[in-house]
Image (cartoon, rainbow, N blue to C red):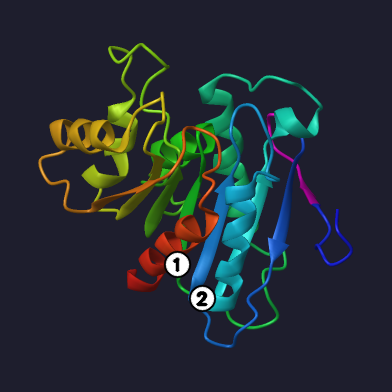
Amino acid sequence: MTADAPPWITLRTGQGPAQVRVHHPTTGDLRGTLILGHGAGGGTGSKDLQSLLSATGHGWTVVLVEQPWRVAGRRVATPPPTLDAAWREIVPAVLADDVPLSTGPRAPLLVVGGRSAGARVACRTSPGDTDGALPPADGVLCLAFPLHPPGRPERSRAPELATPLAHGIPTLVVQGGADPFGAPAEVREAAAAQSPDDSLLEVVEVPGNHSPSRDLPLVTRSVLDWLDRLG
């Protein structure tokens, strides 16, 4: 942890302890809360997730989430249902008094997202819960959405990507032009095939593959522009 990074806050979930790090807005014009998860092979230190901390200068509270499997020191992610179960507890805890988001009133917008597997979790859970414990998201941000395993397009995860669209939730996908998990054109086509109205989906192509893009300024600008258009 760098000297100016906020401390980790531990949250108890049914899957074990999770951790969150809350980065507060640096401007008085509060816009919303951006909650981001990591991929299946790494944590929140990935360069693209870290680049999005600049959203604090645009009125966003940025919350980075370490899933319980990472906190426990495992090398491989647990199955998707366990990731979703933990997320369904983490997000309400972040939005409640368990985590001090700011000293003032909470901004209204909620955007959830993440990189790779974290993006899948955000898509699957974006509509919220029927009992209201998990609120619906106002937007979903996907960095390097893994549309399918490399070389296995028949194992499409397009229904996951279409979930927020089916519930009227704007969704941004920032995808490497050479991503073996699905190129930008594949992502657009798959979403169009799943959703009768894909107008809520925006796909931005950036240089690179499934790893964080070498053009991080483009990633950051694309996300900030999209966030500024929400609400």
Left or right: residue 196 versus residue 22 is left
Q: Position of residue 19 (x, y in %)?
A: 75, 45
Residue 193 shows in this picture: yes
133 over 146 or under it: above or below: below
Identify the residue position indicated by label 2 in the image.
107
Left or right: residue 81 versus residue 16 is left
Q: Position of residue 41 (x, y in %)?
A: 64, 27
Q: Which residues are magenta?
A: 9-16
Identify the residue position indicated by label 1 in the image.
224
Label 2 residue SS: loop
How packed mark 1 is, by other alpha carbons closer than 10 Å (few <14, some 14-19, many 20 or more), is some
140 over 53 or under it: above or below: above
Q: Which mark is residue 128?
A: none
Q: Which residue: 46% across, 38% down?
A: 208
Q: Which residue: 64% across, 23% down?
A: 77
How packed mark 2 is, by other alpha carbons closer than 10 Å (few <14, some 14-19, many 20 or more), is some
